[in-house]
Image (spheres, rainbow, N blue to C red):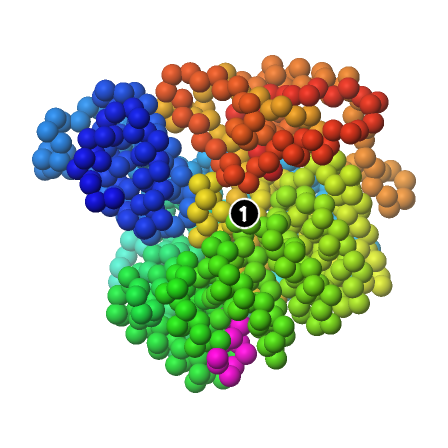
Amino acid sequence: GKRTSSDMSAYSSSIAKEAACTLVLCRQILGDADAVGKIITALIDATAEESDTALLGLQLCFDIVDSGDEAFVTKVAQCLPKQEAESDSTTTTDTPRSDIVWAHFANAHRVLTGGFTSELSLSFLYKNSNYDTLIMTNLKKALEERGMSRNSVLHNCAVTAHGYLTAGTTNDSFLRDNLDWMKKASNWAKFSATASMGVIHASHTTEAMTLLEPYLPPSAPADDPNAEHPTVSATGGYAEGGSLYALGLIHGSHAGSSTEKRLEASTFLRKHLRNSHANEVISHGAALGVGLTSFGSADLEVVGELKELLYTDSAVAGEAASYAMGMVLVGSGAGNASSSAGEELAELVAELRNYSRETHHEKIIRGIAMCLALVNYGQEENADATIEEMRGDRDPIIRYGAMYGLALAYCGTGSNKAIRILLHTAVSDVSDDVRMAAVIGLAFVLHKTPERVPELVRLLLESFNPHVRYASCMAVGIAMAGTGDSDSVALLEPMLTDMTDYVRQGALLGTAMIYMQQSDTCNNRKIKTFREKLANLVGDKHQTTLTKMGAILSTGLLDAGGRNCVISLGSRNGFTKMTSAAGLVLWLQHWHWYPLMHMFSLAVTPTCTIGLNKDFKYPKKFEVQCNSKPSVFAYPKKLEEKKEEVKKRVETVTLSTTAKSKARLARKKAKEEAESGGDSAESAMDVDKKEEEGESKKEEEKAEGMDIDEGAKEDKPKKKRELEPTSFRISNPSRITK
């Protein structure tokens, strides 16, 4: 692609639309933001002759944001013209741009850096939430029955599970109704409970400060630069620290949140980071918050401030500081031979590695190891030297980091070399943790061909080493998340009764990930028995804490984000989603440090289809046809309360007549934003698109991974007691699942 000038002239012709899409894809793979910016500018400028090239340009903006690569998105946005600069730079185009074109450019900026995509997801998750309040009520009841609410681990997990259930839906009514129950959390559990607010309100940036106001640590007034920062006491500060972490989660969970808002939050958090070295809890929260708000920015100043915190040599704060440095430098490849990052960053990475040899704190060593892993995200061969060196280290924690480094460096590439190393380590390393990390790494490297993971891991599931069995369960879960794949579930089934408690925990979590977003008909209705099993495990007095912890978290995973979210490592045009991959790796560190459970908020993606017209409004009569039975993609039924003392859950039966009348009502209400009782299949099926003029359709899910037809076929042989319609319409916006 050297012929840029001739390329540009080609855009005006209609055949070039497809070429533009492909070119943007290639340029994005090469990381060439300027070229992408030029193509989008050319497309939007060509609107004068043809009405829909600008819409294609805007659609491409949505796709670029979807890949979660913060730094790349910002660079593309800088290449697009802004209206204020019109007076100076009229040289770029010979004719001055019309108002319509400027409006399109304004919209493009809104998508790339104005947080428009996260506004859309937020409103979708809020309005279409199918959160079942009874799940939490029953969980709380079960915990209280046996006096287990004194067990802080389970209490903490229940609060976290509530965060997962309502992730991004801003529905925190359960917490508000049960404040006394919440207040049982003390110390780090209190930190974690406050942080879960950030998961519930993810990307609700406008209200972030008001929501967290009661918890935030006191700070100097923003308007007075000379005011002293209030002194921080050395003890306590758990709620305060948690609220700073929550602030980071609100701004950092969604790749498309507004750059300006994120900067505000980052500045606020950095003030606390600089001034709270005395209290390791607050500085822990501030560091994680700074990492999340400056995610992928590779900002030297921020990294410098985090490094200062690391050098206080406090184990807890230092761990957070190193995780945060990893988040800020994610994918920069700093310290590798051929990396684009500057020399200062390379020196910094070298300093970190020296520090990991000097410090006595395992937490800090682990933080630094994970930091180096995140830095090498997507670096492939560039990372080989660094990872080789880490793999040969005497310290198992550094080798542990090397495995995650390998997983992230080759994330989604399916590289045979990486798989060979991971498998070799999984059976040969002396440290259990390293073997565990190696097995989980397989799921990351193979996330584009997930069906290979269960095959690879099948033998490892029979390993005598419980850590390897746990990791195999997690690997299958991550790879097959949201597919409802019956073979994978069958593979994990024997693990649910394993002798070791945390292997059972892994099997529960893995199975819950596979069943995410599946309807009640999934896997011959086995999903229903799994849900019942989870409910019974929590109250079972023979189970150990770790198994119950798995059951509680799985309850949250199953219905994450009001049942509208799924763990997905890929973006819809085939890139690996940086935020999801990094978020999932950090989430997996909850094995060592519970508050990282909230990083789950980065790893989930709302699965919805949203149709917009050229003014970024929802068009009125836009519906999608789905050629499949509604029950295949229906939300799971909500639980019902029973009056007697039987602890069984009851399912209601829907008669075909009610189903039909519901469908009729839904069609009438499609103009409003009513629940349409089902999900849509992807455009891969014959979708009647009522394309009105200038309507751009935004698909929130990769088309490739969606073999809806197969799903529909599997569910056909059913008892014929009710005639279900074979197709249904869904309103806009609506949930789409695999």
Image height check: is 108 above or below 49?
Answer: below
Residue 208, percent across and down? 45, 47
Q: Is residue 619 above or below residue 189?
A: above
Q: Which residues are magenta?
A: 392-401
Q: Is residue 141 left or right of residue 361?
A: right
In the picture of the structure, the residue carrying the numbered disc 1 is 568
Dot 1: within a 10 Å radius of its alpha carbon, few (fewer than 14), some, or many (20 or more) residues? many
Q: Is residue 507 left or right of residue 666?
A: right
Of the pair 515 and 465, the residue shown nearer to us:
465
Count of numbered labels shown in the rendering = 1
Q: Position of residue 74 (x, y in %)?
A: 31, 47
Magenta part, dominant SS? helix
Q: Amino acid at mark 1?
A: Ser
Residue at 77 percent across and 54 percent down: it is: 493
Is 644 situated above or below 461?
A: above
Residue pictured at 67% horizontal, 39% vertical: 518
Quadrant where the C terminus sits is top right
Q: In the image, is residue 396 part of the stretch drawn in magenta?
A: yes
The percent coordinates of residue 135 (x first, y second) are 72, 44
Res. 506 image quadrant: bottom right
Name the residue located 65 percent from the left edge and 50 percent from the top edge: 513
Residue 681 shows in the view: yes
* Above or below for 340 versus 117: below
